[in-house]
Amino acid sequence: MPTDSKPALVVSLRNMSIPIFERTDKKNGSVYRGYVFSYTEAGQRKQKRCRTLDSAKAEAQKFIRDRTEHQPHQREISLSEFADWSAAMRMLRGRAETLVEVVSEWARAQDALGGRGTLADATAAFARTVRETKLPAITVPDLVAKFAAAKKAEGLSALYVDDIEKKLTRFSNTFRGHIGSIKAEEISQWIFARAKGRHANNLRAAISTLFSFARAEGYLSREKKHAAELVRRVKERPPPIGIYTPGQLRAVLSKARGRTRTAMAIAAFGGLRITEVFRLEWSDVNLERGHIVVQAGKAKTASRRIVPILTALDAWLKLVPAEERRGFVTPQYANLENISRVFSGGFDGTGVEFKQNGFRHSFASYRLATVKSADQVALEMGNSPRKLFTNYRELVTEDEAAQWFAVLPPRPGRAPARKKRTGKKK
């Protein structure tokens, strides 16, 4: 082995340098001292050993003359270049590749990368790809079934599970292959061919939830974004805010029947969201104490709140016989898609145009005109005062508010009051 990391002598000739190292070997209990230098021949690293430094010098000079006889343009290497060469050769020790082969492969890799990362980055990405090919496969329909079962087992709202399962079933009817084979552009095309605005974002959110579930279950890589996360959200235009007049409310409630009428009254005089109304149970309605409890699991904001039962709402709720006040307040609880359809259908034949969230918008406007407290109304509706003004408030007068909350059921045996005529008698 070399006794010193520094060469005993560097032979320089014809712009070529060869370092000579002192070497000590032990054999059969005897110590042999000599001198060696290394060289490459036919792609293989070799060593020449000599007994004395002079003989090693002579051999090195002979090697240089033989090697450079037909290579007159060789140059002398610097000490730093020699140090780099020595370090590189140490790294290659025990490997089959030569230094030239290693550098050549590195150069080809750099050219292929084109400045977009390092060779280490490329090999790490390749390793991830290899790992991903070993991920278990599952089809989208099977994944949707597994997802729905998991959410039901978690005890999530049946309304939520039913709604998202229907959205994802539509998705799985188109994409029946493996979840990992779906591209972001395919998801985007599917969504925007079927929906716009908020509805498109709702579809995207449902699909993204499914993909996140697949990643958590080990069907997708945890080391990068899944395809649904790469689909852009669209800018939503806020829907036009419209309210009903007291006369329009009377016309709609007069025509409505049964549980649909009860649901409309709760929305109009309690300000509950449509989805909250359809999750409401009679056990949440306390007529004796005069309030409705919107449970945390049934509220959009996931926080429990108390809604007062005003005089008008109390009158409409008491139209329901006591023996029927059990279970869900409305019959459409299990089908979220029918909620708006049921409400809008109740406007047929009334001459009143259905407005999305019209009952809630109306309650906010008329209630604010009555109590003059944005904080109170926001608390009753489960909103912030700021959102109350930006999303729901429509300027109305106190007189109009009084008329709204005076819309009561007709007394038994009496026909609904006719609208008063205006103008002078002839």
Image: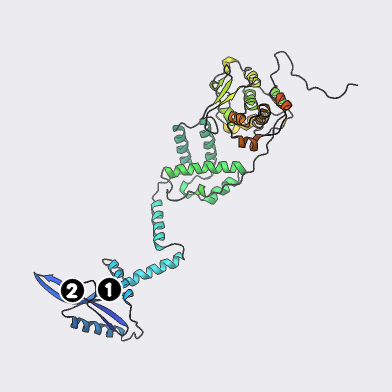
Which of labels 1 and 2 is toward the front?
2
What type is the residue that disc 2 sits on? Arg
Q: Residues within 10 Å of mark 1 (few under 14, many from 20)?
A: few
Where 161 sits versus 316, above or below? below
Give residue 241's quadrant in the image.
Answer: top right
Where 102 sits versus 222, above or below? below
User: Going 86% across and 24% down the picture, which residue do you hit?
Assistant: 423
Residue denoted by label 2: 23
Q: Nearer the viewer, residue 28 or 1?
A: 1
Q: Which mark is residue 44?
A: 1
Structural distance between the alpha carbons of marks 1 and 2: 21 Å
The quarter in which the C terminus is drawn is: top right
> Are the residues at dot 1 and dot 2 in contact (C-beta closer than 8 Å)?
no
Residue 52 placement (x, y as % from top left): 16, 80
- Regarding residue 138, the answer to whether it shows in the image is no
Give residue 257's quadrant in the image.
Answer: top right
Q: Is residue 265 left or right of residue 158?
A: right
Residue 365 placement (x, y as % from top left): 67, 31
Residue 320 placement (x, y as % from top left): 61, 18
SS state under label 1: strand
The quarter in which the N terminus is drawn is: bottom left
SS state under label 2: strand
Where 82 sits versus 113, above or below? below
- Regarding residue 265, the answer to whether it shows in the image is yes
Residue 345 placement (x, y as % from top left): 67, 29
User: Going 64% across and 38% down the picture, which residue do you hit?
Assistant: 390
What type is the residue that disc 1 sits on? Gln
Label 1 vs 2, first from the N-terminus: 2
Q: Nearer the viewer, residue 300 or 322?
A: 300
